[in-house]
């Protein structure tokens, strides 16, 4: 029932053209790649900054 | 002006912009010069930095410059719309909303300063933050629409990258990065006034008080020449002060002589000359000069270091 209500609401929303849909997808991919790059940068920068000392911790 | 809302202008777009528009918002062509001078500062510094951290530092400088450029375009969308040179940008052409550009600029600026601070050091991050505020607020919002000295003072914003690169590697500010700052600072007025001479109509229509519109072309040409002599002198200063070799000094002197020669031609440009080939030639040469002088300094620093080692 709720699903149907949501579907009805969607009909009232903005309908994207094919070009807009492609633009949105390309943007989403760019944001995803940006976030992935950020994770990699923090990961490698942490190792580079601390060096082997990063493994030297009490267990 | 009592609020921080930009002047109205750009039409509201129907849909979020494409990634290419966000990329264009970062002024990639200007960024190449920022990256190059930042890299020169980083590599010429007397202390070595881990290769990846060095890469991260340059990335932060580039992202910070991109964020400042986005904030500049957020504020100036109405001015850009009135100028032929800038009317195709994402905001004036209606491909992107102002809020998107502002948020994108703030996000890039904050991310660049944050990553620089955490990964490299907070002194470099602080200078990066100052350079972004300098460009987006001091230059774009305050100086540019108010005074013909806008790019004289505002030129400082573009002069920070080599200093940030140097500080990222060494963690301290010394005389040499200040000299690198001074070279770009003194280079900016003749570079932009050469452009303003042959784009005076554009700036006039947009209501920007550039020097040719306010003081006249003859006065601008004299000031271009005066600044060019100072640029040439500051360019050889690293050799005179003993920070680099005679090889650099000779390269800087030759490049500086070229700068003064092109400025001399602008000084003698006829009042009725509307094609303004000398001004266009100086503008083109000024870009070659900046690449050349920083490349010469970097090569000199690397060779000297190799000889000492």
Image (cartoon, rainbow, N blue to C red):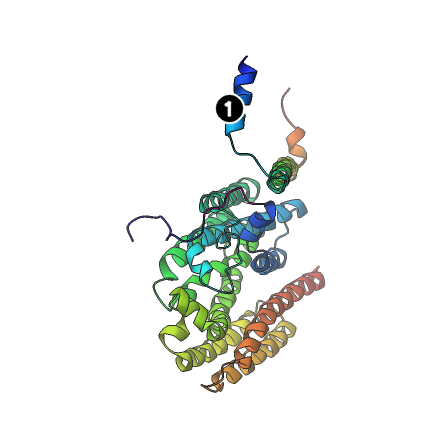
Percent coordinates x, y for residue B266 in the rendering: 50, 82
Q: Give the overall secondary structure of the magenta segment.
A: loop
Q: Is residue A47 above or below residue A10?
A: below
Q: Residue furthest top?
A: A1
Residue B200, quarter of the rendered image: bottom left
The residue closer to the viewer here, B73 or B265, is B73
- For label 1, count other residues whose C-alpha is less than 10 Å away and answer few (under 14), some (14-19) or many (20+): few
Q: Is residue B1 above or below residue B17?
A: below
Quadrant of the drawing holding the C terminus of chain B: bottom right
Q: Does residue A45 appear in the picture of this structure?
A: no
- What residue lies at 62% left-to-right and 77% top-to-bottom? B250
Residue B287, quarter of the rendered image: bottom right
Q: Is residue B47 above or below residue A44?
A: below
Please report the bounds of the magenta region as a residue range. Answer: B12-17
Q: Does residue B138 appear in the picture of this structure?
A: yes
Q: Secondary structure at mark 1?
A: helix
Q: Is B108 on the left-hand or right-hand side of B217?
A: right
Chain designation of label 1: A
Q: Is B249 on the left-hand or right-hand side of B223?
A: right
Labels in figure, total: 1
The residue closer to the viewer here, B276 or B255, is B276
Mark 1, residue position = A9
Percent coordinates x, y for residue B242 in the rendering: 56, 70
- What residue lies at 29% left-to-right and 53% top-to-bottom? B1
Percent coordinates x, y for residue B248 in the rendering: 63, 72
Percent coordinates x, y for residue B249 in the rendering: 60, 74
């Amino acid at each position: 029932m709720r699903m149907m209500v949501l579907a009805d609401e969607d009909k009232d929303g903005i309908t994207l053209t094919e070009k807009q849909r492609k633009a949105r997808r390309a943007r989403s991919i760019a944001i995803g790649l940006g976030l992935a790059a950020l994770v990699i940068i923090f990961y490698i920068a942490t190792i580079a900054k601390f060096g082997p000392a990063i493994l030297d911790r009490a267990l | 002006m009592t609020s921080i809302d930009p002047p109205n202008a750009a039409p509201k777009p129907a849909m979020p912009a494409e990634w290419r528009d966000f990329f264009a918002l970062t002024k990639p062509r200007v960024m190449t010069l920022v990256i190059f001078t930042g890299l020169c500062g980083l590599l010429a510094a007397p202390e070595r930095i881990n290769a990846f951290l060095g890469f991260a530092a340059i990335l932060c400088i580039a992202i910070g410059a991109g964020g400042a450029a986005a904030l500049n375009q957020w504020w100036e969308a109405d001015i850009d719309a009135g100028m032929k040179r800038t009317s195709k940008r994402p905001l004036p052409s209606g491909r992107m909303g102002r809020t998107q550009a502002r948020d994108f600029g703030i996000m890039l600026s904050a991310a660049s300063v944050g990553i620089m601070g955490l990964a490299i050091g907070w002194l470099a991050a602080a200078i990066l933050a100052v350079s972004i505020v300098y460009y987006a607020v001091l230059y774009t919002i305050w100086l540019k629409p108010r005074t013909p000295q806008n790019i004289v003072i505002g030129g400082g914003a573009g002069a920070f990258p080599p200093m940030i690169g140097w500080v990222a590697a060494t963690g301290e500010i010394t005389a040499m990065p200040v000299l690198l700052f001074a070279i770009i600072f003194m280079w900016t007025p003749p570079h932009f006034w050469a452009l303003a001479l042959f784009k005076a109509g554009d700036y006039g229509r947009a209501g920007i008080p550039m020097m040719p519109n306010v003081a006249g072309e003859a006065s601008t040409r004299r000031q271009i020449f005066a600044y060019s002599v100072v640029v040439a002198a500051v360019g050889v200063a690293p050799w005179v002060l003993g920070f680099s070799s005679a090889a650099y000094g000779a390269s800087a002197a030759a490049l500086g002589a070229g700068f003064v020669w092109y400025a001399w031609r602008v000084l003698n440009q006829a009042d009725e000359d509307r094609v303004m080939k000398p001004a266009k030639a100086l503008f083109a040469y000024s870009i070659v000069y900046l690449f050349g002088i920083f490349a010469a300094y970097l090569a000199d620093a690397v060779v000297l270091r190799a000889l000492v080692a």
